[in-house]
Image: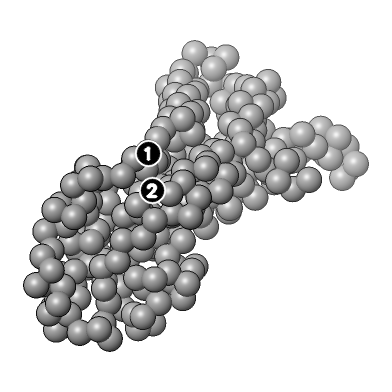
């Protein structure tokens, strides 16, 4: 039941319904619209539209599905057999493996998603809200969507609060303000959820680690031999953030992993 209520499209439907309510009730948004002060209503509706467009973009975007074997992977890595022999057996190694489901070679940091039935590059997690994986190609757009959605939720909560009016008794106050109060509580709950989700993603991005790697590092072949505080992909907070938001294209993580490993040889 919980999955059905908070499943795909829930935030989008909630955003549209809340926007309609905020315009129908006696909030600051409606007052400004009626008096011709259109800046705030137009900007709010624009942000709502941007959040909806980002939702559909992230939902429909290829997160980085692996659809075929990379025949040039061995040469793309830039690692010769002699270089691999320099690494002691006790340290990390570069072992390509085949997915047991789609039978394709899995590049490092990829994982097979049971829901999408594909391996995904730099797999982060499968999000039921968007019914799609969050991976290499759509992760930054997912974070942007969360940021815009959080702004809409917080602004909507403030607008709902401005529509609450005074009454002589609690019963009358609840009768007059019941809908807006329910909207404000719902938006506060969703804001908290999105804020925690956005904060956790920024924290993991700053470390250059995915949600899957953070939660399951003890079961991941290329991480389970690392120390508790060791991350072979970490390049410092600023460099990690810059690479995530500003650099585009597929990263050969085997090269990053091997350089980190050879630094300790």
Q: Residue at x 80, y 37 (%)?
A: 178
Q: Residue at x 56, y 38 (%)?
A: 131
Q: Position of residue 154 (x, y in %)?
A: 53, 43
Is residue 213 something that shows in the picture? yes
- Where 76 sits versus 212, above or below? above
Sequence-wise first label, 1 or 2: 1
| Depth check, front residue: 254 or 156 | 254
| Depth check, front residue: 148 or 44 | 148
- Mark 1–mark 2 contact, CB under 8 Å? yes
Q: Position of residue 31 (x, y in %)?
A: 59, 22
**Mark 2 — residue?**
104
- Where 43 sits versus 149, above or below? above
Q: Residue at x 61, y 33 (%)?
A: 9
Q: Secondary structure at mark 2?
A: loop
63 to the left or right of 183: left
Q: Position of residue 236 (x, y in %)?
A: 22, 68
**Mark 1 — residue?**
67
Q: Which quadrant of the structure image shows residue 62?
A: top left
Q: Secondary structure at mark 1?
A: loop
- Tell me, for residue 178, which label it has, or none: none
Q: CA distance from mark 1 to mark 2?
A: 8 Å
138 to the left or right of 55: left
Viewer-side label of 1, 2: 2
Is residue 159 something that shows in the picture? no
Q: Residue at x 56, y 48 (%)?
A: 114
Query: Which quadrant of the rendered structure holds the C terminus?
Result: bottom left
Q: Which quadrant of the structure image shows residue 211?
A: bottom left
Q: Position of residue 67 (x, y in %)?
A: 37, 38
How many numbered discs sit on the rendered protein? 2
- Where 235 sits versus 61, above or below? below
């Amino acid at each position: 039941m919980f999955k059905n209520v908070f499943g795909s499209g829930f935030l989008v439907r909630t955003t549209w319904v809340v926007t309609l309510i905020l315009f129908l009730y006696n909030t600051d948004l409606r007052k400004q619209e009626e008096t011709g002060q259109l800046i705030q209503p137009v900007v709010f509706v624009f942000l709502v539209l941007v959040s909806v467009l980002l939702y559909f973009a992230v939902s429909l975007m290829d997160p980085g599905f692996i659809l075929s074997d990379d025949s040039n992977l061995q040469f793309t890595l830039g690692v010769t057999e002699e270089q691999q022999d320099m690494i002691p057996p006790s340290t990390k190694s570069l072992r390509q493996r085949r997915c047991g489901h789609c039978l394709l070679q899995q590049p490092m940091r990829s994982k097979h998603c049971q829901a999408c039935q594909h391996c995904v590059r730099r797999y982060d997690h499968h999000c039921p809200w968007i019914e799609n994986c969050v991976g290499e190609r759509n992760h930054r757009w997912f974070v942007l969507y969360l940021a815009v959605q959080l702004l809409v939720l917080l602004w909507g909560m403030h607008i709902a609060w401005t529509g609450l009016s005074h009454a002589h008794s609690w019963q009358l106050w609840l009768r007059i303000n019941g809908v807006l109060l329910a909207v404000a509580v719902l938006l506060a709950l969703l804001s908290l959820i999105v804020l925690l989700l956005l904060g956790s993603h920024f924290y993991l991005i700053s470390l250059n680690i995915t949600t899957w790697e953070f939660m399951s590092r003890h079961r991941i072949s290329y991480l389970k031999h690392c120390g508790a505080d060791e991350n072979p992909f970490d390049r410092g907070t600023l460099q990690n953030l810059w690479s995530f938001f500003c650099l585009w294209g597929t990263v050969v993580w085997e090269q990053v992993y091997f350089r980190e490993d050879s630094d300790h040889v």
